[in-house]
Image (cartoon, helix red, strand yellow):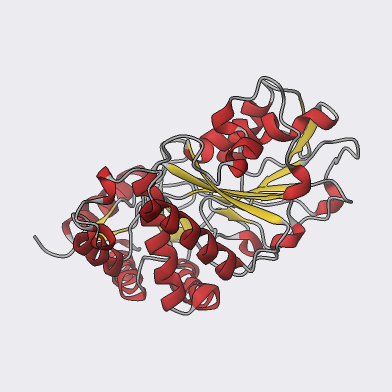
Amino acid sequence: MSKVFNFGAGPAKLPEEVYEIIKNELTNFENSGISLLETSHRSSTYMKLNVEIQDVVRNLLDVPDNYKVLFLAGGGLGQFAAVPLNLISRTGTADYVVTGAWSAKAAKEAKKYGKVNLVLPPTDKYEDIPDQTKWNLDPNASYVHICTNETIHGVEFDFIPDTKGVPLIADMSSNIMSKKVDVSKFGVIYAGAQKNIGTSGVALVIVREDLLNQALPTCPSLLDWTANYKQNSILNTPPMFAIYIMGRVLQWIQRNGGLEGMSQLATKKASLIYNTIEQSNGFYYAPVAKNVRSKMNVPFRIGCPGDDALEKEFLKGAETLGLIQLKGHRDVGGIRASIYNAVTLEEVQALVQYMEEFYKKHSK
């Protein structure tokens, strides 16, 4: 089979170098004679790995000492519930900035546990992030929740909101570790690993220590950040293999320029695609406002509105060339290229070459 270029939104491509490491370690982890898949989570081998990965997270993001690093089961969706369960108790209300499908789902989940204030007017089009002067923030809110990069709609924050002292909570599932972030500006950062830093099954949570010990009495132990911190993320048998893979991906990032290197690469890759769209005389169309276009997920249409027949032909032709998982999310249609850290510049160049050839063939 010819080489496949995977532009899937998640579970997404892993670095090829990491696959080689996994192959070599799969059946004999750390010279233990057995696989990590059959190693006790209470063993010194796993406990050492657990701490090592926490240290990598701290190093890459320059995490301040007053923040705790947790590895939790349930992915990002689990944290949609964990956030209100752990934080909404202070006032019973929370602010949600809905800029796409995932922040909308987070707000819907939070309504089960308290009052949710939608900071922005409801809409069925997510193409921009309104200026903060238009936000309806509640000073009584227990926290303000944002999604820094909307995987489906391709909207990415280019600023850190000023929440006037109210803890800022960020779902960074699809752009974490793609650029430097001032962790001290956030109360909590969380991310499902399967988009940019690993595979499915685990969520990375970074929580400021003053936000612990606030969970609702009904909060399940598995979602209780304080209970998990006290057990060093080994409250029960954790998703060990997913945590291990996340660690190997993070170490790969360290070896390849850290977050500065990932940021530079992300800018190059995204610019190649967006420039191709802009230079197509309207043949390709990106619906998102230029200042908030995602560098991780690039949704686009052929024509405006989209030409379904041409888009199907584009996707079929792409697959014959090994350019896979480019179909847009079912909620929005069209085409979407997810270009996370592990997607190489060469792979994006191959996509752009195909886009240019398709344009020449079908433009009028």
Which residue shows up at 85% across the image and 41% down it?
Answer: 137
Residue 339 appears in view:
no
Image: 364 above or below 8: below
Horizontal arrangement in the rendering, residue 147 relative to residue 286 (left or right): right
Residue 113, given in percent of the width and then of the height, sits at: 70, 22
Which residue shows up at 62% across the image and 27% down it?
Answer: 109
Which residue shows up at 28% across the image and 50% down it?
Answer: 36
Name the residue furthest front: 44
Image quadrant occupied by the C terminus: bottom left
Residue 85, given in percent of the width and then of the height, sits at: 68, 29
- For the residue pair 271 and 169, the one nearer the viewer reads as 169
Horizontal arrangement in the rendering, residue 204 relative to residue 20 (left or right): right
Horizontal arrangement in the rendering, residue 274 relative to residue 107 (left or right): left
Residue 229 appears in view:
yes
On the image, which quarter does residue 122 sit in? top right
Residue 240, given in percent of the width and then of the height, sits at: 38, 46
Image quadrant occupied by the N terminus: bottom left
Which residue shows up at 70% across the image and 62% down it?
Answer: 65
- For the residue pair 150 and 315, the one nearer the viewer reads as 150
Residue 116, given in percent of the width and then of the height, sits at: 76, 28
